[in-house]
Image (cartoon, rainbow, N blue to C red):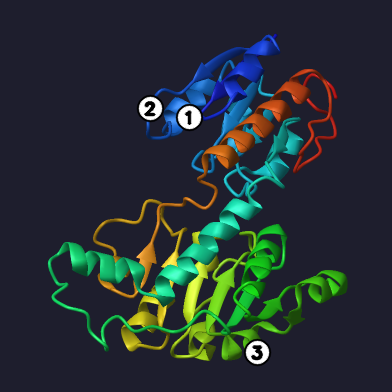
Amino acid sequence: MGRVFVSRRVPGRAVELLREAGHAVDVWPGELPPDADALRERLREAEGALTMVTDPVGADLLAAAARLRVVANMAVGYDNIDAAAAAVAGVWATNTPGVLHETTADLAFALLLAAARRVAESDRDARAGGWRTWSPTAWLGPDPFGATLGIVGLGEIGRAVARRARGFDMTVLAATRTPRPDVERELGVERVALPELLARAGFVSLHVPFGPDTEGLIGAAEFAAMREDAILVNTARGGVVDQEALVAALRAGAIGGAALDVTVPEPLPADHALFSFPNVIVTPHIGSASHATRARMAEMAARNVVAALAGRTPPNPVNRPPAPRGGA
């Protein structure tokens, strides 16, 4: 059978599934991802790869990996893979849809609540000895209950966030390119243009895929359009937000704060300006980080590899090679 490179240790039965299918599995042992040279070397003899969002797979790497037949990304996003170049090279590219939206929506809503109720700020203050007494004026923030939430992108994660918002009796606005009248009606969502959403929402949560159409989607003009008390939540991709514009907006007090699970770059340097704002929360890309969800993601990626190396169309392709290496 084939040789499969797994670019990080993963939870669940993914490696076991690959071995049960008869494949020799090479797991990268380090906590940090392989660098470009190491990734190239490990893929030189591999027929399959189970990759992470931290692994850039471009045309040059695909050309050097002459035996590679499938790149299975352990993520729903796959902006780290040149899927079009992979198709031309005869290599399947796959992702892991449908398994992480609830977990990621949990984090988005947790960030919204934490930012509104100033959880991280007050925790830091308490640990530093600043808690002297109960105060009627300390750590005040906006009420999420009954507030207006603007969801940018009404895919699986955006819809899951909208469902959570119903429990908080929120007015939910959605800016989305594709009208979904049935979904909007079911979730009680009002579809509006992005400028109107920004002007009305007390909380803005981003759930769009990253690509040329969404890079820098939220920039200086958008921050200027937001309410001064509005809180931005981003669990999509860091590049959806113009970070320099975000820093400028925070310095000017143009928005109320931000809660970010994704940044550019990742990790964000310790001396980055975003860490200087007390009203900013930064988490290390943990949107899908539950035991069960990460295990399901890894196992789905493994099944994509197994199918492709068996000459079948993988269950979750994001491209379709006209002439797959090894057939399909």
List the residue tagged with mark 2.
30
Residue 92 x/y as whole percent: 74, 33
List the residue tagged with mark 1.
8
Image point (62%, 29%), residue name: 63
**Residue 185 can be seen in this image:** yes
User: On the image, which quarter does residue 91 sit in?
Assistant: top right
Residue that protrudes farthest toward the front in the picture = 134
Q: Helix, strand or loop at disc 2?
A: loop
The residues tagged by marks 3 and 1 sit, at their Cα atoms, a distance apart of 43 Å
Confirm or deny contact between disc 3 and disc 1 (CB under 8 A): no
**Quadrant location of the C terminus in the rendered image:** top right
First reached walking from the N terminus: tag 3 or tag 1: 1
**Residue 179 can be seen in this image:** no
Residue 254 x/y as whole percent: 41, 88
First reached walking from the N terminus: tag 1 or tag 2: 1
* Disc sitting over residue 73 in the figure: none
Image point (33%, 75%), residue name: 279
Front residue of 44/276: it is 276
Instruction: Please state which amino acid type lies under the numbered disc 3.
Output: Glu
Residue 198 x/y as whole percent: 58, 85
Confirm or deny contact between disc 1 and disc 2 (CB under 8 A): yes
Image point (76%, 39%), residue name: 316
Asked if 25 appears above or below 264 in the picture, the reply is: above
List the residue tagged with mark 3.
196
276 to the left or right of 303: left
**Quadrant location of the N terminus in the rendered image:** top right
Asked if 213 appears above or below 269 in the picture, the reply is: below
Instruction: Please state which amino acid type lies under the numbered disc 2.
Output: Gly
